[in-house]
Amino acid sequence: MHGLGAARDGERDGELPGGYVAGMTWGWTGVRGTWTDEAAAESMRVMVDRVATTWTAVTFAAYQDTAQSVDVHWRDAPTVTEDEVRHAIRAARALGQHVLLKPVVNCADGTWRAHINFFDHDVPCEPKWSDWFRSYGEFVVHYARVAAEEGCEMFSVGCEMVQTDRRADEWRALVAQVREVYPGLVTYNCDKYQEDRVTWWDAVDVISSSGYYPLGDWENQLDRIEPVVATHGKPFVFLEAGCPSRTGSSALPNDWGLAGEPDGEAQADWYREMLASCARREWVQGFVLWDWPAHLYDEADAATNDDYCPFGKPAEAVIRQAYLTATGRAGG
């Protein structure tokens, strides 16, 4: 179990390792068989080189059948295997990256995980919160152990689970289970607009959320989030943030299915505003941007690619410069 002590370094002094999270989400959704080939290795190398990341989020999804199912099939395909997860963590470490391990649950029928929900009071013959948290908790605690053994500096216990957020007691119990096996920084990635609605931020070390806010609205949203961070006195990071390179997406950056023509400049404009607005708020201590696939498209096709990945697009240079400046590497 190497890396257990190292994972604690940032938490001991109440600061994030490196002082600023210049991160990118890598490998989503974690499809079995795609993380250990040369294309995946090259993708990660290119990400670190071109975007100047200091953090890599090894992020993958396990599946439950529907939003009302209580069993998370985290050992089954198409989810990556534990060996593949360990391989990706070690690859990131070999590139000098701090690592966030982020296991996520999705619904196999396509329903967004924010809608996973059950009756607040148990009813016979109906699915129950207790059964779901038991299965989900097994998944999360297993990978918390992996994070400990591999020396990951941060671990996320959940992502954008809006309907579960009100179940504070269950989340506190799960965080406690995670802490029994994992000594590093623990966070929960709430969804956009939910930062001031989660009632159990005191249970985690880092407050984090998904920053998919429209162009022109960043100052308003940061004004809303700032009192939450001030109240709890904990580091804050946008554990997701991004915008497709697509006409119209800057007004609704969380909608990955929004119709529009490829538009790299629109994506770059969104990043310029987001990064500039957040740079004026000292309490925003970084980003884990969305996202960078395990298998990259050809750079020659970047102008016609309309997804979130900034590779080969105008936003790439915007992010790189912001990250170099924030981490004190600009001009070095």
Image (cartoon, rainbow, N blue to C red):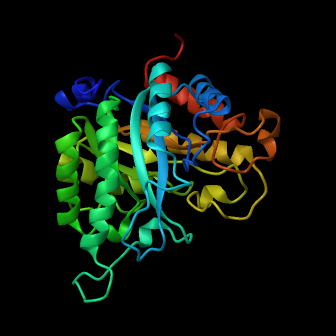
Camera sees residue 189: no
Q: Nearer the viewer, residue 83 or 47?
A: 83
Q: Which of 322 and 37 is in front in this view?
A: 37
- Where residue 243 appears, as percent x and y from the top left, is 60, 50
The picture places residue 284, in percent across and down from the top left corner, at 36, 40
Task: State left or right for residue 240 relative to residue 6.
Answer: right
- Residue sticking out furthest to the top: 332
Say above or below: 78 vs 163.
Answer: above
Where residue 128 sits: x, y (%)? Answer: 28, 78
- Left or right of 280? Residue 226 is left
Which residue: 47% across, 74% down?
Answer: 66
Q: Pick whichever, 193 or 23, lies toward us.
A: 23
Across and down, in percent, residue 61 comes to 48, 54
Q: In this view, does 144 lie above or below 195?
A: above
> Residue 15 is drawn in which quadrant?
top left
Count numbered badges in the picture. 0
Observer-nearest of 218 and 244: 244
Relative to 170, does residue 315 appear above or below in the rendering?
Answer: above
Residue at left 64%, top 43%? 309
Please determine whether, in this image, residue 55 is positioned above or below residue 125.
Answer: above
> Residue drawn 58% across and 40% down?
272
Q: In which quarter of the image is the N terminus?
A: top left
* Residue 249 shows in the view: yes
